[in-house]
Image (cartoon, helix red, strand yellow):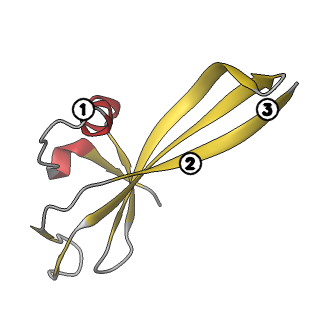
Amino acid sequence: MWITTKEEPINYDKVHRCRYCDDIGSYNIVYTYQVLTLFFIPVWRWNKTYFAETTCCNKQFILDKTVGDMLRNGEDVEIVDSDLSEIY
């Protein structure tokens, strides 16, 4: 039995204008979670978080869980500023 932190990249290729550097870029989206594994079988996941990083100035954000879940399920979603919480 062990606990590990996993990361899964999520494909997001829409372009936006960055509100910080005023350049054009996209977001790199990563889904992170901790998992309890028992005999090589993942049993329980918790601490699920979505992170977004701009490709223009590398500013990092926490992405709204609802929007992240929709992206992970393959839905066509546009990320807006209200979906992002800045990481200081």
Q: Tell me which numbered mark, 3 or 1, is placed earlier along the sequence.
A: 3
Q: Which mark is residue 3?
A: 3
Q: CA distance from mark 3 to mark 1?
A: 26 Å
Name the spot of residue 73 as percent of width and height, x first: 28, 32
Q: Quadrant of residue 58?
A: bottom left
Compared to residue 8, the image places residue 52 above or below, namely below
Q: CA distance from mark 2 to mark 1?
A: 17 Å
53 left or right, relative to 38 = left
What residue lies at 22% left-to-right and 68% top-to-bottom? 26
Q: Which residue is mark 1?
A: 70
What residue lies at 52% left-to-right and 32% top-to-bottom? 48
Q: Quadrant of residue 65?
A: top left
Q: Residue furthest top?
A: 43
Q: Tell me which numbered mark, 2 or 1, is placed earlier along the sequence.
A: 2
Q: Quadrant of residue 35?
A: top right
What residue lies at 28% left-to-right and 48% top-to-bottom? 84
The quarter of the picture where the N terminus appears is top right
Kind of residue at badge 2 = Glu
Name the spot of residue 28 as percent of width and height, x first: 35, 62
| Mark 3 element type | strand
Q: CA distance from mark 3 to mark 2?
A: 13 Å
| Mark 2 element type | strand
Please tell me how crowded label 1 is: few (under 14), some (14-19), or many (20+) other residues with Cα within 10 Å: few
Kind of residue at badge 3 = Ile
Q: Which residue is mark 2?
A: 7
